[in-house]
Image (cartoon, rainbow, N blue to C red):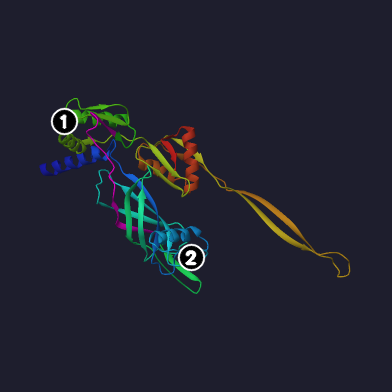
């Protein structure tokens, strides 16, 4: 009997005590100056199986081929009309990681710039990748990996996934380093991923428990760290700070609406007050008809004419008034909204009306 009672108490504690979790500081912040940098370049893909650019419609592809051949010592006769089907002009993009060193390799993404049907089987010719300062930081080259497939025959075609885009794993070699030094300043800022005064204060307090007078929360987005002078000591301090655990902070109630797809997402903090809702469908239908009017007798001397006839009708489906019970948790809110039987488009309008009426306690965000 005693064992059963203990088991019941344990189960009751599991049910009653809310689930709590902690996050590492490395997942909540970024270090000032430690970030990726975008690289971009223009290149040529060769070796395609007749699926390249239609050069008559993409003159920049011919110009690129001519310039490339001239750099290799080959002169293309003036006025020659090259009809190439195995080349394609592409844009090449990549990310330069923080503290990347010369000789390291990064992945690149290759995207068709012209009207190439497919990049499958192609090879990217050596392409310089530049940063925002117009300096070359990497060189890309290699065979393309295309995730899609396609086939065509007799005017019919089928394609699976994207054929005009490809990747090259480790396709770019870094040729220039971007200087990022942590020992230039006496302090380093930690930038929160999301603005939150409570979280910034918690992070500063947790860091100061590990090492006193190290962190100061400047605002809801920035925590300032006072750093030691020695470079190795800086690295060790940042390593400890990144792995510190922070208890989760309460999130703000929010409803996110995607107006393009009709997707509605709400978090667990959304609450609903008792209210009444009625909704119905209103539709306006316009029908255009063309009637033919002609003389009654062939010799009457009239002409046959087309007479347009327009019909306009308005239909409205009646909507009953529904009582939405108060919901203090997400499940009750979902059950109350499901009682309306509204489709996603109607639900978006209902949520906006509930927010205006003060019944919905959450921020509405459209994407």
| Sequence-first disc among 1 and 2 | 2
Task: State whether residue 20 appears in this view.
Answer: no
Q: Give the x, y percent position of residue 323.
A: 46, 39
Badge number at residue 154: none
User: Which range is magenta?
Assistant: 165-190
Q: Give the x, y percent position of residue 159.
A: 43, 65
Magenta span includes 54:
no
Query: How many callouts does the rendering have?
Result: 2
Disc 2 packing (10 Å; few <14; some 14–19; many ≥20): few
Helix, strand or loop under label 2: loop
What residue sits right under mark 2 in the picture? 77
Magenta span includes 180:
yes
Looking at the rendered image, the quarter that the C terminus falls into is top left
Badge number at residue 210: 1
**Rounded to the nearest whole Å, what is the CA distance between mark 1 and mark 2?**
73 Å
Task: State whether residue 42 appears in this view.
Answer: yes
Q: Is residue 170 left or right of residue 243?
A: right
């Amino acid at each position: 009997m005693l064992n059963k009672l203990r088991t019941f108490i344990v189960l009751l504690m599991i049910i009653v005590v809310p689930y709590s979790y902690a996050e590492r500081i490395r997942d909540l912040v970024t270090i000032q100056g430690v970030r990726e940098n975008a690289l971009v370049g223009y290149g040529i893909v060769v070796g395609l199986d007749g699926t390249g650019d239609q050069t008559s419609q993409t003159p920049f592809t011919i110009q690129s081929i001519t310039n490339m051949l001239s750099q290799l010592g080959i002169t293309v006769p003036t006025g020659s009309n090259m009809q190439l089907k195995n080349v394609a002009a592409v844009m090449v993009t990549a990310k330069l990681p923080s503290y990347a060193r010369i000789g390291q390799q990064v992945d690149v993404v290759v995207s068709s710039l012209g009207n190439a049907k497919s990049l499958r089987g192609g090879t990217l010719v050596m392409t310089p990748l530049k940063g925002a300062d117009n300096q070359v930081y990497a060189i890309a080259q290699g065979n393309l990996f295309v995730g899609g497939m396609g086939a065509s025959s007799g005017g019919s075609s089928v394609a699976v996934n994207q054929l005009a885009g490809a990747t090259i794993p480790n396709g770019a070699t870094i040729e220039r380093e971007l200087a990022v030094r942590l020992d230039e300043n006496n302090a380093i800022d930690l930038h929160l991923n999301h603005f939150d005064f409570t979280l910034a204060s918690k992070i500063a307090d947790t860091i100061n428990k590990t090492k006193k007078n190290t962190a100061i929360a400047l605002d809801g987005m920035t925590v300032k760290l006072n750093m030691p002078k020695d470079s190795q000591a800086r690295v060790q301090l940042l390593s400890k700070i990144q792995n510190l655990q922070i208890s989760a902070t309460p999130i703000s109630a929010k409803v996110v609406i995607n107006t393009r797809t009709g997707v509605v997402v709400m978090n667990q903090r959304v609450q609903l007050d008792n209210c009444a809702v009625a909704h119905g469908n209103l539709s306006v239908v316009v029908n255009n008809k063309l009637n033919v009017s002609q003389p009654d007798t062939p010799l009457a001397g009239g002409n046959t004419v087309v007479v347009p006839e327009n019909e306009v009708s308005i239909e409205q489906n009646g909507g009953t008034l529904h009582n939405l019970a108060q919901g203090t948790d997400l499940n009750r809110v979902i059950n109350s909204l499901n009682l309306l039987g509204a489709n996603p488009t109607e639900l978006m309008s209902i949520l906006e009306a509930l927010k205006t009426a003060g019944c919905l306690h959450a921020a509405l965000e459209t994407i």
